[in-house]
Amino acid sequence: MDVSKLLRHYNITEQQWLEALHCADRVVKIKTQANAYWLKKAAPARGLFRYHALNFFSRLLRLPLLKAVPQPGGAAAVINEAARLKALADAGVPVPKIIAEDREWLLVESMGESIVKTLKSQTTQKPTRQKLFAQCLAAINDVHQKGHYLSQCFVRNMVLDREANQVVFIDFEDDPLTVMSLAQAQARDLLLFVDSTARFFTDDKAFFEQKIQAFMTAHNETMRGALKQTVDRLQWITKLPFQKRLGHDYEKLKLGILALKHIK
């Protein structure tokens, strides 16, 4: 690959490229007058202790959706992300366009604004939060109806392309299908998304639960069963004593679990 020719084509200067490549940060934004790009460099594999601990917890509580998904790190993670981005793009799922790839890095186009930053902002009004939440759920549902699944389906891994008015998904260094079924991977998508958004709806519980229940009606019995099994086994968390002393983090966790409680 002729990197110099590539840089000229996208108006990235050699200085910008070298600074990004040698920056200590693993993910670096490169801005040009016309566009912006993200350089994602190979990361080390996740620690084995964390991996085995999570799997032990998953087996102990019979929670297959909480299995640790291997993240190989290095060139394998770069190759995996490139492959998943291409497969999802081919299916019509909004994901970043790959500009160039190497064994040690991936250069992708910046596709929009951070949704989680908007949700966090104190200036964001309730109708905007509701609209973004509904838009994210609709986008996840579209992925599932296409027969696909995501990966780290936290709201932090979603951006809003305002020009196209669509949610774009990012971060695909691991592949849940290596340790679980498609139905489980799709159920896991919702579990992670709900867990990462509940904090924004502690005062808007009815809306939060209604949208989640509507989302579930579009999914098959196998997927709903996989999610219900996990949620049922987590209900004990919602019944802990002295809940007021457990703080806001506990309240968010409880809201997410209860919002999924009535799956049929």
Image (cartoon, rainbow, N blue to C red):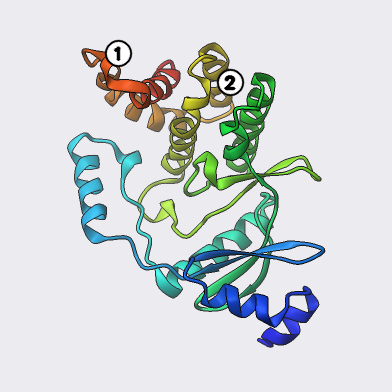
Quick check: 100 above or below 121? below
Q: Mark 2 — residue?
A: 211
Percent position of residue 236, x then y = 24, 20
Q: Amino acid at mark 1?
A: Lys
115 left or right of 257 in image: right
How far across and how far down the image is residue 76, in percent?
43, 71
> Can you tell which mark lies on residue 31?
none
Tell me: residue 26, above or below residue 154: below
The foreground one among 93 and 129 is 129
Q: Quadrant of the N terminus?
A: bottom right
Mark 2, residues whose alpha carbon is within 10 Å: few (<14), some, or many (≥20)?
some
SS label for mark 1: helix
**Alpha-carbon neighbours of circle 1 within 10 Å: few (<14), some, or many (≥20)?**
few
Q: Is residue 31 visible?
A: yes
Could you give the CA–CA distance between mark 1 and mark 2, rounded to whole angstroms?
27 Å
Residue in the picture at 66% in, 75% down: 16
Q: Nearer the viewer, mark 1 or mark 2?
A: 1
Q: Nearer the viewer, residue 9 or 149?
A: 9
Going by the numbered disc 2, the residue's amino acid type is Lys
* Residue 94 place in picture, x, y as percent: 68, 50
Residue annotated with mark 1: 244
Q: Find out whether the residues at labels 1 and 2 contact each other: C-beta distance under 8 Å.
A: no
